[in-house]
Amino acid sequence: DQQVKQNSPSLSVQEGRISILNCDYTNSMFDYFLWYKKYPAEGPTFLISISSIKDKNEDGRFTVFLNKSAKHLSLHIVPSQPGDSAVYFCAASAGGNAGNNRKLIWGLGTSLGVNP
Amino acid sequence: KAGVTQTPRYLIKTRGQQVTLSCSPISGHRSVSWYQQTPGQGLQFLFEYFSETQRNKGNFPGRFSGRQFSNSRSEMNVSTLELGDSALYLCASRRRSQETQYFGPGTRLLVL
């Protein structure tokens, strides 16, 4: 059973426009969420995270929004650049003390293509 | 600060063989996790080690095992390789008190 779902396998956006990547989760105990970016043949790179006590976190061109009632989070990239073309993974964790005995649950990823 | 390193980067084995992959975490990171990535399956969690002890385990058969050394370096072993074990194996490290994991470049394993 997929507890973290990224329902769009792929997304195509024009350079300069906004990219919105979505992630839904089913476990209401999740209290920390992360987004990673992955290029082919490389390991995932951490992008941005958000705690469940917040509903928004911003870092440069990247903003993550969390809607706890809908169990939904989204990653906004503005403006999108061709170098943003990669697979984006959403991950969530729950339980235990922060960082201890906690396991990240991953979505299957969304492949973003930014067209020049 | 150096990132997570994994060796080897590429490996070709045949069915029935065994393989050992190595991971050196970021300095100061004592927690190491291993993941398997295959097309269409995302990142599947294998196990996590901290202070030389396995702390978490995913749903993989006993052919997949690991260990961690006193310097936090970790190894993963897969015995009796099957074709379906062909995948990218990723190692990630983190500080125990933090959520964010930092990944190595992965080892691409091909089983023929």
Image (cartoon, coloured by chain):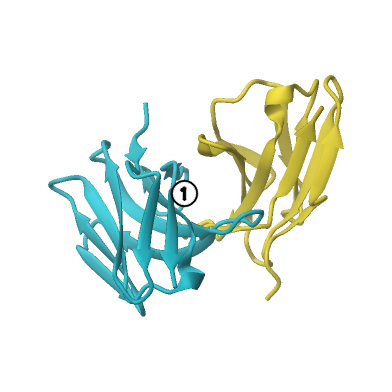
Front residue (pair B47, B35): B35
Above or below — where is A39 with respect to A26? below
Residue wearing tag 1: A100
Q: Residue A19: x percent and y percent?
A: 32, 64
Q: Residue A100: x and y, percent?
A: 47, 49
- Label 1: few (<14), some or many (≥20) within 10 Å? some
In the image, taking residue B52 as reference, residue A74 lies left or right, namely left
Query: In which quarter of the view is residue A63 placed?
Result: bottom left
Q: Is residue B22 visible?
A: yes
> What amino acid does circle 1 point to?
Asn
Relative horizontal placement of residue A77, taking residue B86 as reference (left or right): left
Q: Residue at x 81, y 52 (%)?
A: B7
Percent of width and height locating residue A81: 43, 74
Q: Looking at this view, is A3 or B65 the one in front? A: A3
Task: Provide residue B35's location: percent of width, then percent of height.
Answer: 60, 41
Quarter of the figure that contains the C terminus of chain A: bottom left
Q: Secondary structure at mark 1?
A: loop
Which of the 4 image quadrants contains residue A73?
bottom left
- At 79% from the left and 52% from the top, the residue drawn is B9
Whether residue A97 appears in this view of the structure is no
Q: Residue at 68%, 57% (x, y): give it.
A: B105
Specify the quadrant that holds the N terminus of chain A: top left
Q: Indicate the chain coloured cyan by its letter.
A: A
Residue name at image x 77 percent, y 35 percent: B110
| Residue found at the far left of this picture | A69
Q: Which chain is yellow?
A: B
Q: Chain of mark 1?
A: A
Instruction: Name the one closer to the observer, B53 or B66.
Output: B66
Q: Is residue B97 above or below residue B32?
A: below
From what the image shows, is residue B21 above or below residue A87? above
